Amino acid sequence: MSVSVIIIMGAKGRMGSMIYGLAKDNPDFSVAALVERADLVPGLQNMGVKVAADLDAILPVPGAVVIDFTSPEVSMNSVRTALKHKAGAVIGTTGLSKDQVAELHEAAKTIPLLWAPNMSVGVNVLLKILPELVRLLGPAYDMEMVEIHHNKKKDAPSGTALKLAQCLAEARGWDYDDVKKHCRDGIIGPRPKDELGVQTLRGGDVVGDHTVYFLGPGERIEITHRAHSRETFAQGALRAAKWLSGQKAGRLYGMADVLL
Ligand code: NAD
């Protein structure tokens, strides 16, 4: 099997360090460089890997795929730099605006590009089966979600929760923006039928829990995904990078293209 060359953005971060830890001992991968904020670069030196504060100083590297789990602004800069050098990129960052997602779609016409708010097998299988549940249960069942994450998480609701909620809404023929309810407070009155609530809890070191509720007459179904470790996302990112290195540009890829 050919070796996949990767460049890891945000290498000191929770996800970046996990991805590097898995890739460095895996003969299927060669880490060409680690990129971090300038003030954190000294902490990455003497590891036997090229380190930089700027992706533009590293690229081009023949055949390399950039893996980026950082922040929306940093990830968008990585995509622009990857575009400049015609490199592929796997983006795991969440909290992107609609305009930023539109820019990803545009960039994907020129470079192999994959963006997924959740790289675990379990969540992507869930995304596959939820529309069938929505169809079988029918409109009598109200749909709600709760997500829990650690107390350092910046965006809410999580990118995974939004992806799951969009999947539920689409299966019911709704535009998620028309039905979303991210907060309830005060005298809210009866729940409208065309509503989809996503509530956020934050605390401790929770890696990521998502529960989808189907609340019907006399019964309910709860489907919960719990990530026990970031390793599931990091393995997904490496799998995505390996897959992407054999792909051409054309459209924005997601984890369903890699896993299912
Ligand atoms: P984190 O804050 O621990 O890591 C981000 C890293 O990016 C930090 O080390 C930071 O210093 C670095 N960084 C900041 N500016 C930079 C720059 N200019 N150049 C290079 N590096 C820079 O965050 P995290 O918990 O690792 O999460 C990162 C993102 O990934 C978040 O959006 C999170 O929601 C998302 N995430 C996605 C998945 C998935 O499966 N897709 C899983 C977990 C987290």
Image (tube, rainbow, N blue to C red):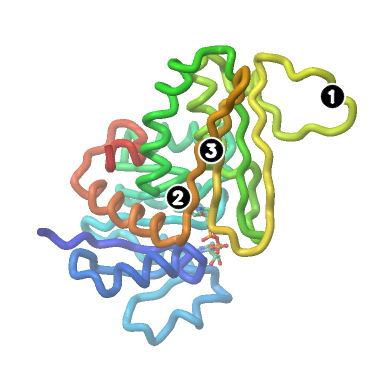
Amino acid tagged 2? Gly
Task: Identify the residue at image location x=47%, y=59%.
Answer: 228
Determine whether the beta carbon of the residue marked 2 sits less than 8 angstroms from the nearest atom of ligand 1.
Answer: yes
Residue in front for this viewpoint, 45 or 137 = 137
Q: Crowdedness of circle 2 by 10 Å Cα count: few (<14), some, many (20+)? A: many
The residue that label 3 is drawn on is: 100
**Residue 249, image x and y in percent?**
27, 37
Task: Identify the residue at image location x=31%, y=41%.
Answer: 111
Give the quarter of the figure containing the C terminus. Answer: top left
Amino acid tagged 3? Gln
- Furthest toward the bottom, the residue is 46
**Residue 7, image x and y in percent?**
34, 63
> Measured along the vertical axis of the image, is residue 169 above or below residue 76?
above
Location of residue 196 by image quarter: top right
Q: Horizontal placement of 16 versus 99: left or right?
A: left
Amino acid tagged 1? Ile
Mark 1 or mark 2: which is in front? Answer: 1
Mark 2 or mark 3: which is in front? Answer: 2
- Furthest toward the right, the residue is 187
The residue that label 1 is drawn on is: 188
Q: Crowdedness of circle 3 by 10 Å Cα count: few (<14), some, many (20+)? A: some
Task: Identify the residue at image location x=18%, y=46%.
Answer: 246
> Measured along the vertical axis of the image, is residue 100 above or below residue 93?
above
- Furthest toward the front, the residue is 218
Question: Label for residue 92?
Answer: 2
